[in-house]
Amino acid sequence: MNFPFYIAKRYVRSKSTQNAVNIINLITFLVIVIGSAALFIVLSGFAGLKTFSLQFSNTFDPDLKALPATGKFFSITPEQEQELDNIEGLVSYAKELEEKVYLKHREKSHIAFIKGIDSNYTKVTGINDALLYGLWRVNQEQAVAGIGIANILGLSVNQSPLVVLALKPGKGSLSQKDLKTKPWFISGVFGIEENLDKKYVFADISSVQSLLGKDENEISGLSLKLRDTDDISAVKNKIGSVLGKEILIKDRQELNSTLHRMLNTENLATYLIFTLVLIIALFNVVGAIIMMILDKRQNLNTLYNLGTTLKKLRSIYFIQGILVTAAGGVIGVTLGSLLIWSQITFEWLKITPSLAYPVEYRTINVLIVLATILVLGVIASKISSSRITKKLLAP
C-alpha cells in the first residue's frame, strides 16, 4: 500500500489528543457536507424550474418551425409540400397564418393575434392538451381563445360571437373600408401561460387568409413534427433545402432563445454564488489540516528522522485533505439526493396548495458538485500541506 495514503487514512480515522482539534475537524467535515448538499439541492431546484418553465413553450411550440427571414409572410407551393412529404424523419407539418387584429365582443375590446391553423396543427403541437373547457373545434364558424382573452372580453362558449377586425393590406390613408370583419363563435378556451393566454385566438387558416386578404399558399409559419429529435440537424438541413434560403428553420431552443439564456444565466449565477460559499467554507479545511500538522508535529519529526522525505510528509496531509473533502462531498450529495427524492415522491414543499415545487434529479448535477468539491479540496489541501517545511520539523 502507498505509504502516504496509509498514514493519511489512519489520521482521518484517528482522534487527536486535543479535544479542540477534534471539534474543529468535526465542524469542518459538517461544513463540507452541508455545503455540497446545499449546492446539489439548488442545482436540482433550478433544473426543475427550467423544465417547469419550458413545458409551457413545449406545449405551444413544435419540434421545428419555418419562418420568413425577412417580412412576415411567405408562400409555400404544392411542389414544396410534396417534397416535404418525402423527407424521412418528418412526421407531419402544419401551415399557420398569424397577424395582429382588433377583437370586439359586445362593449369590450382587446388587441391580440389571430392564428389561422390547419387540421394538422394539433398533431405537431400539444396545444389541444391545454384546453380548459369546451371543445377544440376550429372551422369557418368556430375558434378557440385563450383564457386571458376570454376573461378580458367576457367570452362564453358558443354564446355571442367574437368579432375580429383586421386591416386590408395596402398603402395610403386609412378609412372604414380598409377594415375587414369576421365573427367567430368560441368553441373552447385554452390555458398555457399568462402572456400566451392573452395573445392568441386560433381559427381556421382559410378563413384567416380571407380575412387578411392572402391567397391559399401564403402563410406566416410552418410547424413541423419530427420522428426523432436526436437527429434534428439532418432533418433541419433537408427542410431548409426544400424551402430555400429565404426561410429560417428554428428548433425549440432557438424559438425561445431569450428564455433559455435567462434560465442558463440564473443557473450559472447561482452555481457561482454557492461555489463562493464553498470556497469560504473550505478555508476551514486549510485551518483544520494546519491544526492537525501542529498536533502531529512530534510524529512528523519521528517519520522525518526515520527517512521519510519532506515530499512524502506533505503528501500525507494532501491526501488527508482530499479524503475529508471527498467523503464530505459524497455524503452531502447523498443527503441532497434523499431530499430531492422525497420532494419528487411526496411533494412536501408546495408553491401553491395544488402545485409542488418542481425539482429534477440529474446525474450531471451530481458530477458537477463532486467535481467542484474535489477541485476546491485539492487546492485547500495543497495550500495546507505546503506548510510542512524543514523549519517546522527542526528540533
Image (tube, rainbow, N blue to C red):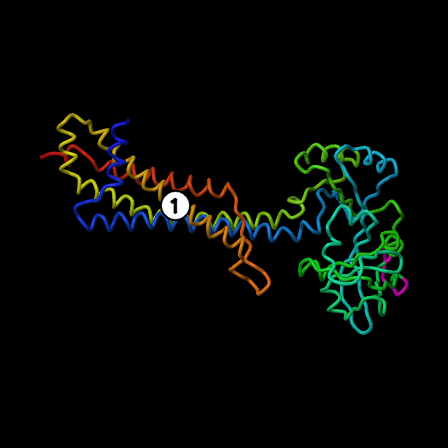
Which residue is pictured at 20% across the width and 29% down the height? 310
Q: Which residues are magenta?
A: 168-177
Q: Is residue 264 left or right of residue 257?
A: left
Would you say residue 169 sits in the magenta stretch? yes
Residue sticking out furthest to the front:
346
Q: Is residue 74 above or below residue 391?
A: below
Would you say residue 29 sits in the magenta stretch? no
Which residue is pictured at 72% across the width and 46% down the height? 62
Residue 40 in percent (x, y) is at 45, 48
Query: What residue does disc 1 label?
Result: 331
Residue sticking out furthest to the left:
395
Which residue is pictured at 55% across the width and 54% down the height? 358
| Marker count (numbered) | 1
Q: Is residue 182 left or right of residue 258?
A: right
Q: Is residue 34 left or right of residue 343?
A: left
Q: Quadrant of residue 183?
A: bottom right
Which residue is pictured at 82% across the width and 33% down the height? 86
Give 55 or 152, whichever is nearer the viewer.
55
Residue sticking out furthest to the bottom:
107
Helix, strand or loop at mark 1: helix
The dominant secondary structure in magenta is loop
Q: Quadrant of residue 392?
A: top left
Residue 254 in percent (x, y) is at 65, 44
Residue 302 in percent (x, y) is at 13, 32
Q: Is residue 335 above or below residue 104?
A: above
Q: Amino acid at mark 1?
A: Ile
Residue 272 in percent (x, y) is at 44, 47
Q: Quadrant of the N terminus?
A: top left
Q: Is residue 241 above or below residue 344?
A: above
Q: Quadrant of the C terminus?
A: top left
Structural crowding at the residue carrying mark 1, measured as other residues with C-alpha within 10 Å and reported as few (<14), some (14–19) or many (≥20): some
Q: Quadrant of residue 91?
A: top right
